[in-house]
Image (cartoon, helix red, strand yellow):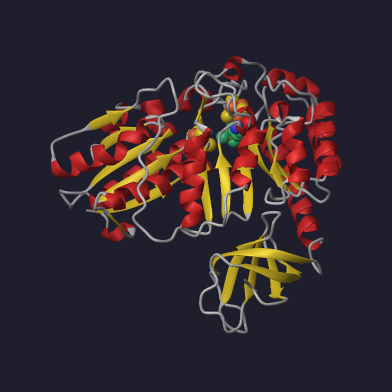
Amino acid sequence: MKFHITTMGCQMNVGDGDWLTRSLIGLGFTPAPEEEAELFILFTCSVREKPEQKVASELGRIADRHRDNPNAFVAVGGCVAQQFGTALWRRFPMVRLVFGSDGIAGAPQALSRLAAEPGLRLSLLDFTETYPERDQSWPEDTVPPRAFVSIMQGCDNFCAYCIVPFVRGRQKSRGLPAVVAECEALAGRGAREITLLGQNVNSYGLDASGDGTSFARLLDAVATIPGIARIRFTTSHPKDLSDDVVARFADLPELCPALHLPVQSGSDAVLTRMGRRYDRAAYLRLVDKLRRARPGIALTTDLIVGFPGETDDDFRRTLDLVREVGFDSGFSFMYCDRPGTVSERMEPKVAQEVKSARLAELQALLDERLAAALAAQVGRTTEILIEGASRRDSPTGPSWRGRDPGGRIVNMALPGVAEAAGTIVRARIRQAKKHSLIGEAEADHD
Ligand code: SAM
Ligand code: SF4
Ligand code: F3S
């Protein structure tokens, strides 16, 4: 049976989608473009209203296009599946499997059964006590140069605005040997860069499911794996980023000089109500330590505008913090109520027009920061891990797309090179575009 996966939401969903693809291929399914597929798998996100609404429109669209095919069916995974569960069956009859983040381990077998038994519907929505280890299937010889490896599931932080702990469950760390084995398998098949994934990677190993191995020790273990040239990780909560992990930015050359460190707000009053358990001064101290450990580290962040009770003065503090830290870029979101969260019941809510105006002002500042950060790269020599062909060719021929150690996208021509994916190329940055850079090869690539 041909399948097509659509992924919304965060990188955890991307990692889950990559694993499910490998597993299904191992079971005899074939990946296909949406027009040719009969099995449609949606990895969904419920962190804000917009991604949640996108799920309904996506399910409606699939139903419109494929309802004439009696074999066609849909599986919904991720956070909306966990949130709405089997209620999705009633609203969308084509949906025959719903699975949450712990249930995904059983999804390949469930999909095989569903393909064989047309009348059946299944749900995999239970949370487990420990990290649900998944069977690994390696049907292809090669994997993409950038790979994602889950190191934990869920989150215990319960930030006031956030639905994630409700839809991903309590924090459960994966055992070190399983993480290392998956990284080794990926490296052996061509992965050069590994991104370690979790909602709060810095508290890896510290929950009841973990064995006490710290995140810093996990980084050490992954860095020794032959073939892995680059390590990244996401996401980090500032309150849990230990001095040991900061020190790894100085000590481990494999650890990329880039960190996504969501700050959410620049106002101490708002941070307290958000339940973030750090203040502006502590965040700035952390930034300072990181920059001392790894000068030039590219810092990016997440910011929420219009949290309940946010005043204009609070918002000015956020703008001011963005300038003071000098983030390379950031994601900014308009606060929205999520069911069951603490802030759902907090008053006063900020008016929609005020939220929109604040978001536009913050976004303009972040755009300025991004332009400045990209412009600052021009003239520098750096190393680009090539991920594949660029979407557009350069005027001189085919173009390749990769990333510098800071995570910035770089497009460049490599004259005479037939296949460059997975190689690391020395390049000089020639030009900054709106969201990416243009490079020029400096010497032979490896
Ligand atoms: N675990 C990460 C952390 O601690 O920051 C990421 C959590 S969430 C998947 C990604 C981002 O969505 C958050 O950093 C936050 O900025 C945003 N977000 C979460 N809940 C939100 C809400 N109710 N309204 C607006 N933005 C929200
Ligand atoms: Fe949500 Fe906070 Fe957990 Fe991040 S740390 S997933 S924002 S509860
Ligand atoms: Fe969205 Fe769930 Fe990730 S709510 S951001 S897909 S953890």
Q: Residue at x 73, y 19 (%)?
A: 272
**Residue 204: x percent and y percent?**
59, 29
Question: Left or right of 310: which side holds 40?
Answer: left
Measuring 82% from the left and 45% from the top, which residue is drawn there? 326
Q: Is the residue 207 above or below the residue 57 in the image?
A: above
**Residue 407 image position (x, y, % from top left):** 67, 54
Image-based side of 154 in relation to 249, left or right: left
| Residue displayed at 64% across by 35% down | 217
Whether residue 323 is visible to the viewer of this picture, yes or no, is no
Asked whether residue 299 is in view, the answer is: yes
Q: Quadrant of residue 119?
A: top left
In percent of width and height, residue 325 lies at 83, 41
Relative to 216, say whether 15 is above or below: below
Q: Quadrant of the C terminus?
A: bottom right
Q: How many marks?
A: 0
Across and down, in percent, residue 147 comes to 51, 51
